[in-house]
Amino acid sequence: MKRNLVYFQSLKKQSQPIVCLTAYDAAFAHWAAQAEVDVLLVGDSLGMVVQGHQNTLSVSVDDMVYHTKMVQRGNQHQAWCIADLPFMSDATLEQVLQTSGRLIKEGGADMVKLEGGTRVLAFVKALSQMGVPVCGHLGLLPQSVLKKGYRVQGRDESEAQRLLDEALALQEAGVDMLVLECVPSTLAERISQALKIPVIGIGAGANTDGQVLVVYDILGLTPGHTPSFSHNFLQGSSSIKEAMASYAQAVRQRRFPAAIHEMKA
Ligand code: KIV
């Protein structure tokens, strides 16, 4: 079944979790769509897991367009496809419009994702007014790693309140979905309940409207460190498709993330 924003809104109303997975090429996208994953995120995490860089900062707009095209060929437009605006491709409104236009027109993405809160509000508003579906991204922001590191965000009340305010402001500006990365589960629940749009968590506990993980992590393919909130679904599965289906089922049945993966509140 082809997924769309109306469908995701209905899942949120029915408290049915949305299953999201990153994808970077046609083969993985094909099997993820076959495994009934709802959303494929062409994340700039490809800079780390595919290109082997230390962080996501060197990913270019050309890289994102190239990978999004491949993903949509494999996906055949079944799962909803989100593409990231990479680091510094969203510094000005002109750049945001140009990059988003390329991701949608050349890459075939259904939605674009930008990191940040207050900084991107005007950009979100402009995209939304032009009819471009937008996904926000708050909490741990991988594109701000040089300044903030990879740390859980929103632990103290003033930071938590700032994130809630920014989430509401993004919704007001026009985002149709929000990714919340590495925040305490209690805060993720508070934000999910306060927002009308679906909130997709990663390392943010069980009480969001959906979950996203990096596909290489769930298949045990990431060399070295795998985030503690992730899980290798290939263990106990006999194929990549089965592992992806097992992840999808665990999210839908709220068995993932299990208690051991919950961030400490
Ligand atoms: O780039 C990415 O894969 C992401 C996820 C970690 C949410 O933004």
Image (tube, grey):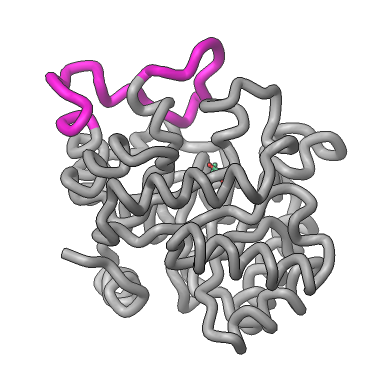
In the figure, is residue 213 to the left or right of 10?
Answer: right
Asked if residue 67 can be seen in this view, the reply is yes
Q: Work out which quarter of the rendered image holds the N terminus and state it.
A: bottom left
Q: Residue placed farthest to the bottom in the image?
A: 129
Q: Work out which quarter of the rendered image holds the C terminus and state it.
A: top right
Q: Residue 180 placed where, x, y %?
A: 56, 53
Q: Residue 236 placed where, x, y %?
A: 17, 18
**Looking at the image, which residue is at 19% across and 50% down?**
36
Extent of the magenta region: 220-243
Q: Residue 74 placed where, x, y %?
A: 28, 46
In the image, residue 128 sits, relative to residue 24, either above or below, namely: below
**Looking at the image, which residue is at 27% across and 67% down?**
3
Compare residues 190 and 151 and report the one nearer the observer.
151
**Looking at the image, which residue is at 45% across and 62% down?**
109
In the figure, is residue 12 to the left or right of 55?
Answer: left
Asked if residue 254 can be seen in this view, the reply is no
Q: Residue 244 placed where, x, y %?
A: 24, 36
Compare residues 156 and 205 and report the one nearer the observer.
205
227 within the magenta span: yes
Q: Residue placed farthest to the right in the image?
A: 147
Q: How would you classify the magenta stretch by its main secondary structure? A: loop
**Looking at the image, which residue is at 69% across and 72% down?**
97
Ligand 1 is located in which of the four quadrants?
A: top right
In the image, residue 110 sits, relative to residue 207, either above or below, namely: below
In the image, residue 98 sits, relative to residue 169, either above or below, namely: above
In the figure, is residue 252 to the left or right of 24?
Answer: left
Compare residues 240 and 71 and report the one nearer the observer.
71
